[in-house]
Image (cartoon, rainbow, N blue to C red):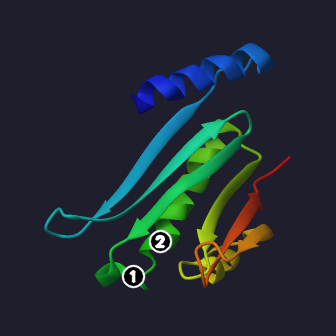
Amino acid sequence: MSHFLWNGLIRYNRSKTGLSNYERAVFSARDSRGRIVGGVIVESYYRETYVELLWVDDASRHAGLGSRLIEAAERRARKRGSRLLHLNTYSFQAPRFYEKLGFRRFGGMRGSPPGASRHFYVKRLGK
């Protein structure tokens, strides 16, 4: 069902913009036993790439894995000609992490969820 909905939206957007370069990519990281310990999902369209999801297992955090996954997403975005990489994160997740990687906060919402906030970030990749 979700695939059907995405295809409908892509067809509509293509009819309005003439662009048809939508692509979704998944990068994963595995430990020495082959278990997935992290990953990132990105969606590229027009000349931008959106980080839909970044996750790193608790035991694998603070070892540079998240940075390497975002770097992989950025390489993919640059290869596709994206001018920017954007994402959102919650205050209890990783705002400072993204700022250290060169993302700039451009908006937010307080109280979503209650007691926390949501932050929107962008990183310019080129002209």
Decide: few, some or many residues near mark 1? Use Cα within 10 Å; few <14, some 14-19, many ≥20.
few
Q: Residue furthest left?
A: 33
Asked whether the residues under the numbered discs 2 and 1 touch, taking CB atoms below 8 Å apart as contact, a structural biologist would say: yes
- Residue furthest toward the right? 127
Left or right: 124, with 111 as reference point:
right
- SS at mark 2? helix
Q: Quadrant of residue 44?
A: top right
From what the image shows, is residue 58 above or below residue 12? below
In this figure, which residue is indicated by the disc labeled 2? 66
Which residue position holds label 1? 61
Residue at image position (59%, 79%) is 114
- Depth check, front residue: 70 or 43: 43
Calculate the distance from the C-alpha at mark 2 to the C-alpha at mark 1: 7 Å
Residue beneath the point at 63% across and 72% down: 112
Identify the secondary structure beneath mark 1.
loop
Among numbered discs 2 and 1, the one appearing first in the sequence: 1
Of 2 and 86, which appears nearest the observer? Answer: 2
Q: Amino acid at mark 2?
A: Gly
Q: Amino acid at mark 1?
A: Arg
